[in-house]
Image (cartoon, grey):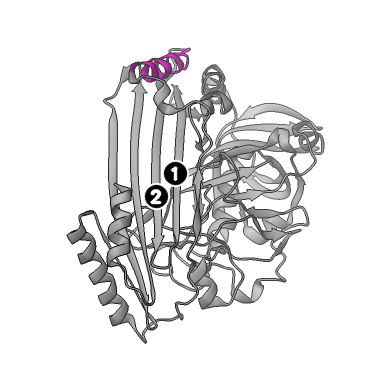
Amino acid sequence: MIAKLKTIFREIAPDSGFCSLRVVREQSELLCVRRKVAEPLKTGDDCGAMFTVISEGGYGYAATSDLSRAGLERALAQAQHWAEVSRGRLVFEPLGFEHPSGSYASRVEIPWVELSLKEKYARLHEQVARLKTDDRIVHWEGRLWYTDVSSWYLTNQGGEVEQRQFCLAPDLKVVAYADGETQRRSLGAPVRQGGLEILAEVGFDSDAPRLAEQALELLCAPNCPTGSTDLVLDGNQMVLQIHESIGHPLEVDRILGDERNYAGTSFVTPEMFGSYQYGSELLNISFDPQRPGELASYSFDDDGSPASKQFIIEKGTLVRGLGGHISQRRSGLPGVANSRACSWNRPPIDRMANLNLELGDSSFDALIADVESGVYMETNCSWSIDDSRNKFQFGCEYGRLIENGKLAGVVKNSNYRGISASFWRNLKRVGDASTQIVAGTPFCGKGEPNQCVRVGHATPACLFTGVEVFGGE
């Protein structure tokens, strides 16, 4: 298919100006077992293409699922029409788009196709059965969601990029109930690029008994105490903390007001870059879309910009925004290669990719030992953040008290709240590699019409001081 599309594009693309064709095919399989019952296999196969045209200061795009020559010619004509209509009406000058050449493919040790469908369901049944350890467990399930995304990017000046991402999202979930109390535990968000080797890496094959035991513990546990205290967050909760209170507010198109009527703005302003103290000196946040195995890894973004590791926050200071080629031209701010689209029928916009907290030097035991009185929390279960991505409130599935430098009793309904600046400035310790979690979300929503993209986060556990925590009563 792609060889034919390349030939057609070379024949119909205009010689002058800029023209690109982005072709995307996504294939998926979703397996689910609930309460010993296998649900029907869900599959998806979606393919299409988008033209982008820049001509004499105009900018236009158009997409189609008709990949015949006639279908592509119609889409190209529509993109050219919108480029003509927009001429002289844009808020930026569309210049300097890349004509890249290169490729990318996820590293895979055990391909998804190596196991038959029957074998995959058998593996799911085995782990789901291990969740049902007590009559008080009223719901138990497991899922395996696999996607294979192939993309091709061609330009009228010889640019040609081929990328392929294999993603696997495993999950286990257990719900316990007794005497009017309901508690749940889950595997979290260990979605990554790769193959079936991911299952062993994230605990899918081992953690079912632990999750069941902790759900039952929570039924009898007291509520999380209320007050200002030290807080240790496990890496799987840090994933969401980084995502919501660093990632989204630093998207440059949001800072420029593009999301104002949909998902809000940002407390960050253009003047803050280069000087604003976002957190303590221990806060080092990197944009790294070439990290192997992380969910949003790639070599080029969807506007053809080459991707590389860049620091967004360095020693606590805000140094760079999450803005792609267009946002960089509009704002004059330094950015990254993060123009990304969820599929062939959406234009690229500023999105997080792999946004990571660089490692510190504290083991988990050292993080806990540094706390005289506090709370430890892991695995997000609820979240809320204001429309400027500043004030937040998060809830966690599982908590434990910390007393005299040691983990103590389990607490339920563990919640904390804060304001981004004061919260990150109270970062006291950052965990080492032994505390690191590599996870992400396949459902980060943004834009009108909405786009859900895959975002990765690698982060260690962290210790914060002076955080307001509270329980469920």
Q: Is residue 471 visible?
A: no
Q: Quadrant of the C terminus?
A: top right
Q: How busy is the neighbourhood of tag 2: few (under 14 within 10 Å), some, or many (20 plus)?
A: many
- Whether residue 130 is situated above or below residue 455 in the rendered picture: above
Q: Is residue 34 visible?
A: yes
Q: Residue at x 68, y 26 (%)?
A: 409
Q: Which mark is residue 164?
A: 1
Q: Tell me, yes or no, whether the two marked residues, 1 and 2, touch with CB atoms within 8 Å.
A: yes
- Amino acid at dot 1: Arg
Residue span colored magenta: 118-134
Numbered mark located on residue 151 in the image:
2
| Amino acid type, residue under disc 2 in the picture | Ser
| Mark nearer the N terminus (1 vs 2) | 2
Closer to us: 49 or 241: 49
Q: Residues within 10 Å of mark 1 (few under 14, many from 20)?
A: some
- At numbered mark 1, what does the secondary structure look like: helix, strand or loop? strand
Coordinates of residue 211 in the picture (x, y in percent) = 53, 23
- For residue 32, which quarter of the picture? top left
- In the image, farthest residue toward the bottom: 88
Work out how far the residue at label 1 is from the one at label 2, CA to CA, in angstroms. 6 Å
Answer whether residue 215 is magenta in the image: no
